[in-house]
């Protein structure tokens, strides 16, 4: 006796559903005051590090642009435009 195609797919769907439920994320427990303060300090430290990294990247990009212009013999335009 042959089973219809529908019944061959059902076990695969059940397994996929069980795996999905097993990997479901549980809600985070409420944080106490010390944990909130530590999280805020960590967030501030990460923001400072990101700001410093952005500044370093900008300096590096400026150095590369200046070197490129110097090697290609380019000159920068004057800030005053002639009318």
Image (cartoon, rainbow, N blue to C red):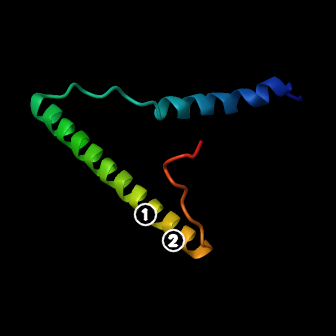
Name the one closer to the observer, 43 or 73.
73
Judged left or right of residue 81, residue 9 is: right
Residue 78 x/y as whole percent: 51, 54
Residue at image location 34% in from the left, 26% down from the top: 27
Image side of residue 12 versus residue 32, left or right: right
Secondary structure of the residue carrying tag 2 is helix
Q: Residue at x 57, y 75 (%)?
A: 71
Above or below — where is 33 with respect to 54? above
Q: 9 above or below 53?
A: above
The mark found on residue 45 in the picture is none
How many residues crowd mark 2 within 10 Å: few (<14), some (14–19), many (20+)? few
Measured from the top left, where is residue 33 in percent x and y?
11, 29
Question: Is 63 situated above or below 34?
Answer: below
**Residue identifier under label 2:** 67
Q: Position of residue 62 (x, y in %)?
A: 45, 61
On residue 60, the disc is 1
- Foreground residue, 80 or 43? 80
Q: In the picture provided, is 14 more to the left or to the right than 79?
A: right
Residue 29 versus residue 82 in the image, above or below: above
């Amino acid at each position: 006796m042959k089973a219809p195609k529908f019944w061959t797919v059902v076990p695969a769907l059940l397994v996929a559903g069980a795996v999905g439920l097993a990997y479901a994320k549980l809600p985070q427990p409420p944080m106490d005051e010390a944990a909130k303060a530590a999280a805020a300090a960590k967030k501030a430290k990460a923001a400072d590090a990101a700001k410093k990294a952005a500044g370093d990247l900008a300096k590096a990009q400026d150095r590369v642009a200046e070197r490129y212009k110097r090697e290609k013999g380019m000159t920068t335009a004057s800030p005053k435009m002639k009318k």
